[in-house]
Amino acid sequence: MELLRDFRSRGLARRCIQAIEELSSGEEYTFMHVCGTHEQSITRHGLRSLLPANIRLIAGPGCPVCVTPAGDVDAAVELAEQDKVVLTYGDALRVPGSELSLAQAKARGADVRVVYSIREAVKLARRSPGREFVFFSIGLDTTAPSVAMEVKRGLPANLSVLNALRLTVPVMELLLGMGDLRFEGYLAPGHVSAVIGARAYEVLAKAYGMPVVVSGFEPLDILLSVAMLVKQLREGEARVENEYSRVVSYEGNQIAQRLVEEVFEVATVHWRGIGRVPFSGLRLREEFSGFDARERYGLEQRSGRDIRPGCSCHLVITGKLSPQECTMFGRACTPAKPYGPCMVSSEGTCNVAYRYGG
Ligand code: SF4
């Protein structure tokens, strides 16, 4: 770990790649990460081309915007069309619903605004008590604590939450049961792990025999994490290791975990491109249900059109296809005019591939 002082040192990267080459001795290994920031770092720094040919890195479902189901976007659009002010993060604006995105609803006159946090949503709602506001809450384990904190403090009466928060470990577990998807180790996401701790992945190692390394985001973090995974495999081990110990602890942020548990309960929810994932979502607990936009406005949980004809996001999200293998990539689908959800956000695998190449 001492070596990681200079996270972008070419010399250290070279030594790390050499170690991976020696450790793997030509054995073919595929490793999956589930993090949009990892995909950006891997692609931007060309790590796939630097690694030996026998080591493959694939991207799983790490972009919250990409996995938010069309049905949830439809619910947000419906509320916007009913004259509610819908507030959400910038990336969520263009994610396609079954018919419309929030950006398209806005273009038709709906009041849809970008906020950077739920705190900003609270301020906006307080400033206009005569209007009704809905915060469309998209995100993974990292976003949940800030939402939980504001809900626990008490939202203004004219603000509710349309919740689409997702949990990372249950989907990582589900992917291990996909017969047509094979990989030998997980690079666990650094940001998410700062909240849930390295301990959260023990189930993957212990119950499924899957090596896991919690990884930081610098090129050397990722290369070192790959080396650690290869080493585990060569030793016939499957354990959870923490390469990102300068930020992530074994237990994680227990204050944040308790807060999330106090406000939310775990629910089985639908992921775009994947389907129903047991115990992979968060739902406001009964005592906070007055802040739940679905309850307040009587919205039913509906399924929407997640994948449009010709889009292969369901395969990209599960690491079965690279963006460049989709016939729409860079032609009918670009970041300026995204056809599928993986091209919308800067964390989407197709968007990253378009911006930084293969
Ligand atoms: S390139 Fe576009 S259409 Fe193809 S999988 Fe990616 S987002 Fe979907």
Image (spheres, rainbow, N blue to C red):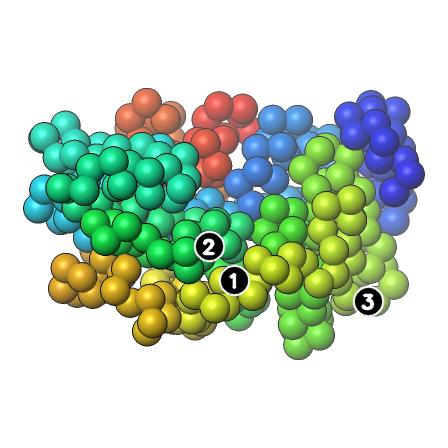
| Cβ of mark 3 under 8 A from ligand 1 | no
Left or right, residue 35 beside residue 306: right
State whether residue 347 is above or below residue 285: above
Q: Earlier in the sequence, mark 1 or mark 2?
A: 2
Looking at the image, do the residues carrying marks 1 and 2 touch, with CB atoms under 8 Å apart?
A: yes
Relative depth, front residue between 7 and 263: 263
Q: Is mark 1 within 8 Å of ligand 1?
A: no
The residue that disc 3 covers is: 237
Amino acid bearing label 1: Leu
How many residues crowd mark 1 within 10 Å: few (<14), some (14–19), many (20+)? some
Tag count in the figure?
Answer: 3
Quick check: 119 left or right of 249? Answer: left
Q: Which residue is mark 1?
A: 259
Foreground disc of the pair 3, 1: 1
* Alpha carbons under labels 1 and 2: distance apart: 7 Å
Q: State which quadrant residue 232 falls in.
A: bottom right
Q: Position of residue 27 (x, y in %)?
A: 78, 52
- Residue, disc 2: 149
